[in-house]
Image (cartoon, rainbow, N blue to C red):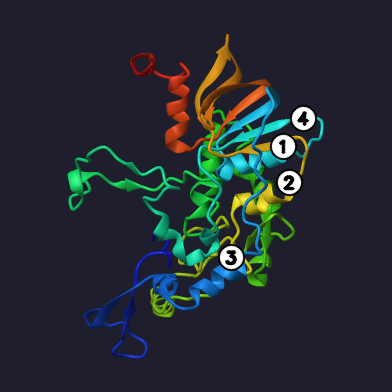
Amino acid sequence: MPMYRRDLCAGEISRSRKNNMDFNSINITHERMYPLPFANSSLFPMLLLSLASQKIAPKISTTFKKEYDYIVVGGGSEGSVVAERLSELPCVSVLLLEAGKTPPLVTDIPGVSRFFYNSDIDWRYKTTPQKHTGNALNNRQIFWPAGKVLGGISIYNDLIYSRGAMEIYDKWAEQGCKGWSGREVFPYFMKLEDNRDPEYLANGYHSIGGPVTITKPRYESIIKKPIFESAKMFGYKVVDPNTPKLSGFYDFQATIRNSQRCSPPKAYLVPAEYRPNLDIVTSAYVKKIKIEGKQATGVVFDYGGSEHTVKATREVIISAGTAKTPQLLMLSGIGPKNIWKNSM
């Protein structure tokens, strides 16, 4: 049985009998997990004012050195964490380069995420025309959200906290990714959590004290109760999706702190913003990785209307997303030769 999530448009189910579901009397009324009309209400400016005192992004550097120990390309969920963790070591210097800008303050509101699809903080990707799907779309092309902003798609995703199945990590390890088995990555999931729900903490698969605040959203869909009741009628259990037991229905948790988005920039980079060994530069578009022999030695990027080159004495770490990472590798001469030769 697939897991069902409340992040989809849902409906109101009316039942004709107390203990039995009558599927002929289902009345669907459009509803979203987070009611979007709030953004048009008189309370919206008041909420923005309350957010003005909140820190959602770190201090941004406007200058940078010619050489660093580590250069991290891409300041999304992965890049933010990697840059912060590396800079915990005071003996190394770290440069984090992000092509987008800092997130707008309004993105801290959980319910406005869909307003930023196809905006200036989105890469505005569309797939190539599809053969077997996208029938109702122009040219059969599917819109693919991807964040062009510090924090990446974590700045306007639906906040759902989901680790992924442990057997997937085990398969990664079997295929050669040493250190990535489910047993080996589990302590790092525990390390990041500051879980605020006692019923989840009690099962031994969650922890407190980490940088990312996790809790259940206060808003509950009107369809939640009927769905869970019907699931129990058919013998399914309500489970925690972040445990090995993945079969059933679940009430998801979200990366929310004090009713506001708890993004990687807020959780990791803001506490580290005054470290002298960490520079965070936004609106810096990396065009190429410089390679000498088989070693990445630096990056070439556009910033402030000029092209710049910065050297990396130890490593260049590419965390530019599922589309930009392979593109950057191929533009740097890494990948299928017939593809990158034609693109250079």
Do tag 2 and tag 1 residues touch (Cβ < 8 Å)? Answer: yes
For disc 2, the marked residue is 272
Residue 212 vertical placement versus 289 (above, below): below
At label 2, which amino acid type do we have?
A: Ala
Query: What secondary structure is marked by label 4?
Result: loop
In this rendering, does residue 217 appear at all? Answer: no
For disc 1, the marked residue is 278
Do tag 3 and tag 1 residues touch (Cβ < 8 Å)? Answer: no
- Is 236 on the left or on the right of 142, as rendered? right
Residue at the far top in the pictured view: 293
Residue 84 vertical placement versus 295 (above, below): below
Q: Picture quarter containing residue 197?
A: bottom right
At label 4, counting other C-alpha atoms closer than 10 Å, the crowd grade (few under 14, some 14-19, many 20 or more) is some
Mark 3 or mark 4: whose residue is earlier in sequence: 4
For disc 3, the marked residue is 260
Mark 2 or mark 1: whose residue is earlier in sequence: 2
For disc 4, the marked residue is 92
Residue at the far right in the pictured view: 91
Q: Residue at x 69, y 48 (%)?
A: 187
Query: What secondary structure is marked by label 3?
Result: strand
Task: State how far apart marks 3 and 1 are (Cα).
Answer: 26 Å
At label 1, which amino acid type do we have?
A: Leu
At label 3, which amino acid type do we have?
A: Gln
Task: State how far apart marks 2 and 3 are (Cα).
Answer: 20 Å
The quarter of the image holding the N terminus is bottom left
Mark 2 or mark 3: whose residue is earlier in sequence: 3
